Image: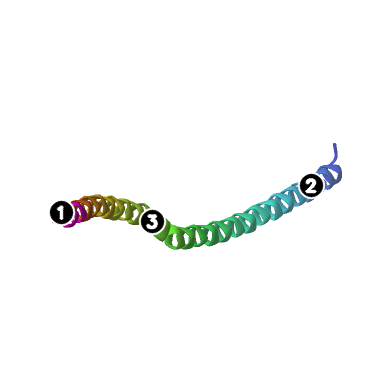
Amino acid sequence: MTDAQLWSAWGIWMGVATVVVLIAAALLIVIWLTARKILADAVRALHAAEAIRAHTQPIWSLRDTNEVAEDILATVQSIEKTGGALAGALAREESVR
């Protein structure tokens, strides 16, 4: 191989290497931009999840509200039963007189 052929082959392979490096750099840039978009979407999704959690927090309080309502209902039923018994006793007492 002559010096001219050697320099020619070297130039061709340097051109091929340059193309390969440019393609790799382009792919890395695309990957980097995609990763940044994924990060932005993840941050947006996190904010949405936090907003959903904040908006659904009152739903968990309904359980406490229902427990209190059940306690109130039991108390009212007890009062109704006792009041009914007292009213019946008073009615019988009135009829005896």
Numbered disc total: 3
Residue range in magenta is 90-97
Counting from the top left corner in percent of width and height, residue 60 is at 39, 54
In the orientation shown, which residue stands out farthest toward the left? 97
Badge number at residue 93: 1
Front residue (pair 48, 27) = 48
- In the picture of the structure, the residue carrying the numbered disc 2 is 16
Counting from the top left corner in percent of width and height, residue 55 is at 46, 63
Counting from the top left corner in percent of width and height, residue 69 is at 32, 55
Identify the secondary structure beneath mark 3. helix
**Marks 1,2: beta carbons within 8 A:** no
Magenta residues: mostly which secondary structure? Answer: helix
Question: Residue drawn 54% across and 58% down?
Answer: 45
- In the picture of the structure, the residue carrying the numbered disc 3 is 62
Front residue (pair 45, 66) = 66
Q: Residues within 10 Å of mark 1 (few under 14, many from 20)?
A: few
Q: Residues within 10 Å of mark 3 (few under 14, many from 20)?
A: few
Front residue (pair 5, 12) = 12
Between the residue at mark 1 and the residue at mark 2, the CA separation in whole angstroms equals 114 Å
In the orientation shown, which residue stands out farthest toward the front? 97
Identify the secondary structure beneath mark 1. helix
Residue 87, by quadrant, is bottom left
Between the residue at mark 1 and the residue at mark 3, the CA separation in whole angstroms equals 45 Å
